[in-house]
Amino acid sequence: MYIESLKKFIKYFGYRRRVKLVLFFLMSLIAGALEFLGVALIYPFVMLIVSPDHSVPFIGKQGISLLSSLSPVHFALLLGFSALVLFVVKNLYMILFLFVQSKFIQKWTFDINNRFMQFYLYAPYQKILKISNSEKLYVITTLSNQATSGFFIRVMNFVTNLSIVVLILGLILWKFPFAGIVSLLFIVVCVVCLNLFFKNKVKRLGKNIQQTYNVANNINYATVNNIKDIKIFCCEQKFYNDYGACGAKLADEVTLQTFYGGIPPYFVETLIVITLLLLGAVIAIQNISQSSVMVASFAMIVASIFRIAPALNRIQSALLNLPAGLNFVNALIKAYEKFGLADFEYSDYKKSNPLPFNDKIVFNDVCFSYDDKQVLQNVSFEIQKGDFVGIIGLSGAGKSTLADILTGLLVPDSGNIFVDDLKLDSSNRHAFRQNIGYVQQDLNVLERSFRENVAWGLPADEIDDERVSYLLNQVCLGEVIKSYADGIYAVPFIGDTGLSRGQKQRLAIARALYRNPEILIFDEATSALDVKVESDITDMLLSVCKDKTIIAIAHRLSTLRACNKLIYLKDGRIVDAGSFEYLEGKYPEFAELIRLSSLNK
């Protein structure tokens, strides 16, 4: 299961990192080798101190004779100094390794998040609609970080510390075969039993934690994103209780995970002490008549245990927590497959000139469906340049879908759209969209300055302040801007405070006009405003946008009297098109819409 998930993860998110992962493996072996050399030097060092004339394994008299100018004691001190230098070098190397590892993991996490963010921004809009906002945020704020830091760092730590333990145990087995085998068997049996006891508990907890994280993310997003509605409906206690219950559950699960993860080190310490005594007893029996060998052996064993103990603890911790990290890895793999990132090709839209619009837009038998639900059926109509067109109909008639198709966000299942006899397709939709200004019902106001809200999406140094000020005056926000000391650089937006909804709507219109588009689309943009504000904004539009083509979609019809053409939509089909008076006189249902909107009073 680990290998399969690991292979999938590297396949999906490797981004040419296979070579770096191999290099990390080699760096782990180097770390183990440095630990090995540091411990290996202990034995000859102690032997030469205790018995200068003794033939020392690893060195021997031949080795000492190579440095005959040095006395055995001096040579022993040289070995000790070498061991000290090696220890410092090893620690410096491990610090460097830690930095490189951290940088590698953080860059990997960023690249994974970047991959998903590219998908969110550049994938077809219809595909993005199927993913909730909370799920999008969960992937890039939790999953990727937990998958890399919670799994791959543990894998790397496991490999590093395993290499240390294996090489040092190899040294002990080489120098003390019988004692080493007995001790190794004892360690293996104890570690296996310890893992069997804790593994299932930690694995189950890891799965629960991953699921609870997801639930908590949904609750947090729903709460923060709907505070106004929560207060209006007096639901504070319900949302607070949901938040508290989920938070308490997550805290309990993480507490247990931390508890189970903290127990093994104490067992390992006990295990190490028992192993030390066991090794000491065996070595003492084997070398009872050679005190110098016994002392040097004990020194080497103590040094080995001193290095193995923390490594074993880190190995044990990695083994216990890897299942929890694996749950996040599998969840990230599932998100990759669910979103279809394997088939997604990132294509940055280069800055280009807007697609010209000089004559008319033609819809020809356009059909569209969401999954199996037919939304638009054989829709055909024309919009002449300079028209003020209203698209009307009851909720669910397909008006907003029609607007999304017009902007190129949604691609028709069949039928065609022509702009000045040029067929819209994947090669020119983005260029056409650059000639469209769009104002929607849900106001998206950034908590940034007026100028950044008007020049939406442009770098700060590319914003034309004169045009920003001109447009704000055009949409009747000039006096509002003057009330702020910083003018267009003021940042008044905190939640719903700072500006009225009508003022925010005017700001959104200024934003739509900033790039001087030929076409303006208003999708339910004034439905939440009162009749007076709606009327004022409509009058302002007629004044400011005399040379623009305007397409307005609304439930309420008060803004549509100024339209020179209305398209009446019902159940995804166009019933008819014509003037306000024409549709009112011909269709009783249309007249009923007028009555319900109180326009005949």
Image: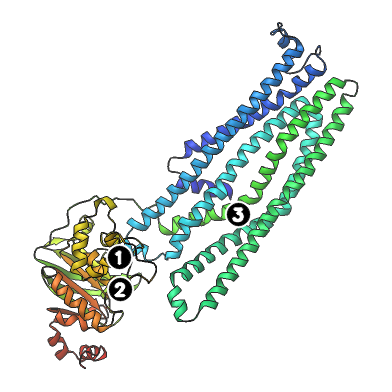
Which is nearer the eye, 58 or 126? Answer: 58
x and y percentages locating residue 92 in the rendered image: 59, 31
Vertical comparison of 494 with 532: above or below: above
Q: In this orientation, does residue 204 appear? A: no
x and y percentages locating residue 320 in the rendered image: 66, 50
Q: Name the secondary structure under disc 1.
A: loop
Vertical comparison of 511 with 91: above or below: below
Vertical comparison of 236 with 216: above or below: below
Q: In which quarter of the image is the C terminus?
A: bottom left
Which is nearer the eye, 492 or 387? Answer: 492
Q: Residue 484 carries which label?
A: 1
Mark positioned earlier in the residue sequence (1 or 3): 3
At label 3, the amino acid type is: Ala
Query: Which residue is under mark 3?
Result: 324
x and y percentages locating residue 588 in the rendered image: 20, 92
Residue pushed farthest bottom?
Answer: 601
At label 1, the amino acid type is: Tyr
Q: Name the secondary structure under disc 3.
A: helix
For the residues marked 1 and 3, what is the alpha-carbon distance in whole angstroms?
52 Å
Q: Which mark is residue 441?
A: 2
For the residues marked 2 and 1, what is the alpha-carbon distance in whole angstroms?
26 Å
